[in-house]
Image (spheres, grey):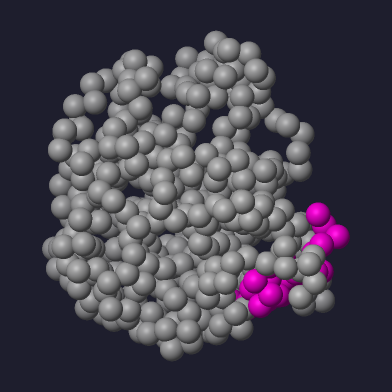
Amino acid sequence: MSTNESTRAFPKGFLWGVATASYQIEGAVNEAGRVPSIWDTFSHTPGKVFNGDTGDIACDNYHRYSEDIQQISDLGAHSYRLSLSWPRIMTETGQVNQAGLDHYKRLIDELLERGIDPAVTLYHWDLPQWIEDDGGWLNRDTVGYYTQYVETVFRHLNDTVPKFITQNEPWCASMLGYGLGHHAPGLRDWRKAYRAAHHLLLSHGEAVKLYRAMGGKGQIGITLNLTHVYPGSSSEADVAAARRQDIFLNRWFLDPLTKGSYPSEYFERLRPFVGPLDFIRDEDMESISTEFDFLGVNFYNPAHVVDDPEDNSLTGVKQVSTGRERTAMGWEIEPEGLYDLLKRLQDCTDKPLYITENGAAFEDVVVDGRVADTERIAYLHGHIAALQRFVAEGGNLKGYYVWSLLDNFEWAFGYSKRFGLIYVDFETQQRIRKDSFTWFGQLVAGNGLPAMARSIE
Ligand code: IFM
């Protein structure tokens, strides 16, 4: 190996993977005892999802999981991050649906047979509708419903799953779902958003405690979507604005998990929107901060903000553009944001970090059976180069998952945004490997950035 190549290599054992989530890929919403989720309700409500798209069929992965596992195996990925569909596993009466559990047992066994480690997310937003009807994440009892569900999962899958992730992006589930209304259940009330956020965090803590009590054999952690926030200038007002935005996006979740407290400097600002934080009980904080084994980080882009005195909303900030290129989601591409975020996280936790999602949507087109997605390759290359720098400096990063294996149901954007390494024709369910699939496969094989992309740097 030349010096050039060795400096590009990641440590031996670094985990390379791909990620998906149940509602985004499975389809088969009425099969084998699955009950409706809040995303079935939301996506079937006119005006909520672009084009009226739903997850009814999605990538039909429920039926095609073997084919998709074959793809992961051909890619050479070491790990597959998938989520379990809670409404496949617990029926409306709170009883276990054996057919739902069996589906995941088969899927996980097949992964293991092919030498692929499953990383199982327990909640990626598809709350059973029967729980929503009882108040959803606003109701403290949902924490109990959740522990009942994860207890069932641990009992059946403890021996075969090396990594559990309790919650995916509780910021999105609470703030987008209950505060801004962009996601299911579609409410717009900050008090509800913060209440839901607290119960989501509490459910994480209770699940970690339960896992330990049940003799969990692998590791358990949580995944947060974290956005490094830069002030738009060095003025006091903009620095303070960046700090507020950082609390809103990051610290409201990081602090309770790693310090056992919410950022109190934000309480005053929250009060007119949220009222008393009386849904937080003292004993909750100990539970939420139960020691986890790893922190999952989903990163897509950082934010640049300035103070906006005209803005009377929660944070009073305005996002500013830096003129960088954007993905099809409109997100500016800035890999340094990932490096800076990870550096900062080293001050929050000494636990291993995993990038549990990173990737980009672009306007992919199939030409003569090929998808030449050079922009996605450049995006991935830039972010993995940032990781390499972090790791070379001794950063405690153990793995990286591309979002996503397949083009899939991108929530309120329906099927209009394609994040996959594999193109999915949603009419025929044909899968076409994009150029980024080949590129990522080479990266995994070489445990470092492949030569073909070096010119992109
Ligand atoms: O598709 C989502 C995923 O479900 C959660 N993290 C962000 C992705 C891209 O928006």
Region in magenta:
428-457
Which x, y percent locates residue 418? 63, 59
Give the side of residue 27 with respect to residue 133, left or right.
right
As for residue 450 lying within the magenta part, the answer is yes
Q: Residue at x 37, y 20 (%)?
A: 265
Residue 139 at least partly seen: no
Q: Quadrant of residue 125?
A: bottom left
The image shows residue 449 at horizontal and vertical percentages of 72, 65
Quarter of the image for the C terminus: give it.
bottom right
Relative horizontal placement of residue 50, taking residue 204 as reference (left or right): right
Q: Quadrant of the N terminus?
A: bottom right
Q: Main secondary structure of the magenta part?
A: helix
Q: Residue at x 60, y 46 (%)?
A: 338
Residue sticking out furthest to the right: 455
Is there any visible trace of residue 118 in the rendered image? yes
Indicate the position of residue 303 as horizontal and vertical percent values: 60, 34
Figure check: 16 above or below 339? below
